Image (spheres, rainbow, N blue to C red):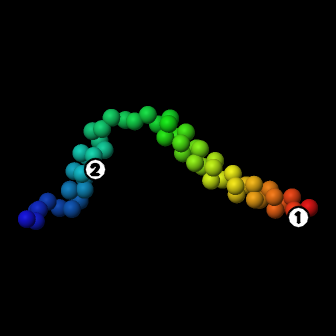
Amino acid sequence: MESKMPIGQRIARFLETRYVHRAHPHYLPEFAGFGLILILAVWPMLSMVAAALEKMR
């Protein structure tokens, strides 16, 4: 059975029921995890640049 509700209204209702009424999480653990991932991703790149610059001398 097909719903007669417009797709925009269905999306708005889904987002409202999923995200608006939930409790706000603690952001510090998420921020710390993101920072750790960022450091682990950038560190090898910076090390490679430093090694290349040192080799060019």
47 in relation to 18, above or below: below
What type is the residue that disc 2 sits on? Leu
What type is the residue that disc 1 sits on? Met
- The local crowd at label 2, few if under 14, some if 14 to 19, many if 20 or more residues have their Cα within 10 Å, is few
In which quarter of the view is residue 52 placed? bottom right
**Residue 26 location, x and y as percent?**
44, 34
The tag on residue 11 is none
In which quarter of the view is residue 34 placed? top right
Where does label 1 land, which residue?
A: 56
- The local crowd at label 1, few if under 14, some if 14 to 19, many if 20 or more residues have their Cα within 10 Å, is few
Please tell me which residue is depicted at 24% across the width and 51% down the height of the picture. 14
Please tell me which residue is depicted at 84% across the width and 60% down the height of the picture. 53
Disc nearer the start of the sequence (2/1): 2
**Residue 50 location, x and y as percent?**
80, 56
Where does label 2 land, which residue?
A: 15
| Secondary structure of the residue carrying numbered label 1 | helix
